[in-house]
Image (cartoon, rainbow, N blue to C red):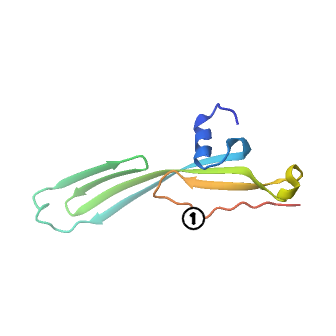
Amino acid sequence: MPNIYPEIIYEIKNLKVNPMIVEHFSETIIQQQKDIITKLKDSLIYDTVLVRVFNYHDEFYTIKGIAIGDTQKVHIESRDSLIQVVYKGERFKPWLWIFSKRKLEQVVSCKNTNSKVEYSRIIEVVQ
């Protein structure tokens, strides 16, 4: 893989895989969006305030909210990147050295530390 894509080389090295043995690289960006409307309870603090607004933003989440009367509107967006690398791993028969093919192995991770990969699988079809 040429050094034309240094950010991809960085991601592969981050997964502790040698870039020279990579067969396939895949990255999927995921964005989720959910609007929430809920009722607020009466409070002495908010009795005189008609509207309250809040905003939160970081690398992976954007949350915006507004309280109008007894209703709370919340808008949440989350972003994540799924990194997948398929590479040549161990040999099927290591004692045969170069005469034995290598197994394809896969590493999958999410950039968001709050996310985790629940399931990943490679299926090899032999005919």
Q: Which residue does the image show at 72% across and 55% down from the upper left?
A: 105
- Count of numbered circles on the image: 1
In the image, 47: left or right of 21? left
Q: Which residue does the image show at 40% across and 51% down from the upper left?
A: 61
Q: Position of residue 37 (x, y in %)?
A: 32, 62
In the image, 105: left or right of 15? right
Q: Which residue does the image show at 68% across and 45% down from the upper left?
A: 18
Q: Position of residue 101 (x, y in %)?
A: 84, 53
The quadrant the C terminus occupies is bottom right
Q: Which residue does the image show at 72% across and 41% down from the upper left?
A: 20
121 vs 19, nearest the viewer: 19
Q: Position of residue 32 (x, y in %)?
A: 47, 55
In the image, 14: left or right of 99? left
**Above or below: residue 36 compared with residue 56:** below
- What amino acid is labelled 1 in the image? Glu
**Above or below: residue 99 compared with residue 43:** above
19 vs 36, nearest the viewer: 19
| Tag 1 secondary structure | loop
The quadrant the N terminus occupies is top right
87 vs 59, nearest the viewer: 87
In the image, 10: left or right of 89? left
Residue at the front extreme, as displayed: 95
- The residue that mark 1 highlights is 118
Residue at the bottom extreme, as displayed: 41
Asked which quadrant contains residue 10, the reply is top right
Asked which quadrant contains residue 100, the reply is bottom right
Q: Position of residue 82 (x, y in %)?
A: 57, 52
Q: Residues within 10 Å of mark 1 (few under 14, many from 20)?
A: few
